[in-house]
Image (cartoon, rainbow, N blue to C red):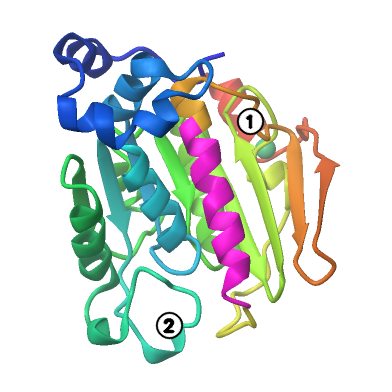
Amino acid sequence: MAYLGNRREVYWVSKMGLKESEKIRYSRQIMIKGWGEAAQLRLKAARVAVIGVGGLGSPASLYLAAAGVGYLRLIDCDAVDLSNLNRQVLHWSIDLGRPKVESAAMKLTQLNPEIEVDPVNEALTADNVAQLLKGIDVVVDGLDNLQSRFIVNEACVSLRIPYIYGAVYGMEGFLTTIVPQKGPCLRCIYPSASAPAEAFPVMGTSPGVVGSLEAAEALKLITGIGKPAIGRLVVYDGELMHFDEIAVKKDEGCPVCSRHKSIR
Ligand SMILES: [Zn+2]
């Protein structure tokens, strides 16, 4: 089942096909049942935004780049700090003080020169979110607070862009896939947000797990393979090494997705 519309780019990229080097680079995933060159071409034509290239955004963007997502927009306004390095694996000691999007773009382009990486060194706000998400097919959450996520969630519902939510705390992680009109949005699940914490505990592997799962969900949405976590909040407990899931329903009184539905 495809979750993304057929755009003109998909048609043109399909016409061009894959280069020999791409057929080899992606050969092991092209072998997956249902993938083939057709799914690979959909990835090549896809435009994904990763908002925040820290603990979650590092593994997510690494796997998206490696898998051949044709265009990655990285959005972050922070510079690399020493306290980031236990978990933000795209950034190394030599990058201290550099803008994170620059550090990330350099690594991702070296990993896969076949794709386009667009670093945007800006803070995401309610005023610029629509502009930052222009032309984007899927949004991947690399944020660290619920207030910013609410801004992204509302924009994605309004613009009908699938949004993959991921979050971590300590040795735990959370993930759900939001496809507007096909299930609950983030506000259906979390009705309100407390003020963001200055710093909270994170074991580096927690965003490693959740960021990788976010990338997997994005690849599934784009290729149309598998069943995404729509209406399911996946909970990862790294302390007990246990995955659980909570069924989540659309809130008919949700101030975000019910309102946007009625406007339309
Ligand atoms: Zn909602």
Which percent across, then down, holds residue 130?
A: 34, 42
- The disc placed on residue 171 is none
In terms of depth relative to the viewer, which is nearer, 156 or 109? Answer: 109
Q: Residue at x 43, y 31 (%)?
A: 29
Say left or right for 140 vs 9. right
Give the alpha-carbon distance from disc 2 to disc 1, as whole Å: 31 Å
Q: Which residue is mark 2?
A: 85
Which stretch appears magenta? 203-219
251 left or right, relative to 22: right
Determine crowd level at label 2: few under 14, some 14-19, many 20+ residues with C-alpha closer than 10 A: some
Task: Point out the image quarter for the N terminus.
Answer: top right
Residue 115 in the image, given as x and y percentages of width and height: 20, 41
Hey, which quadrant is residue 240 in on the image?
Answer: bottom right
Considering depth in this image, is 76 or 102 the residue closer to the camera?
Answer: 102
Name the kind of residue labelled 2 in the image: Leu
Q: Does residue 243 lie above or below 255 as drawn?
A: below
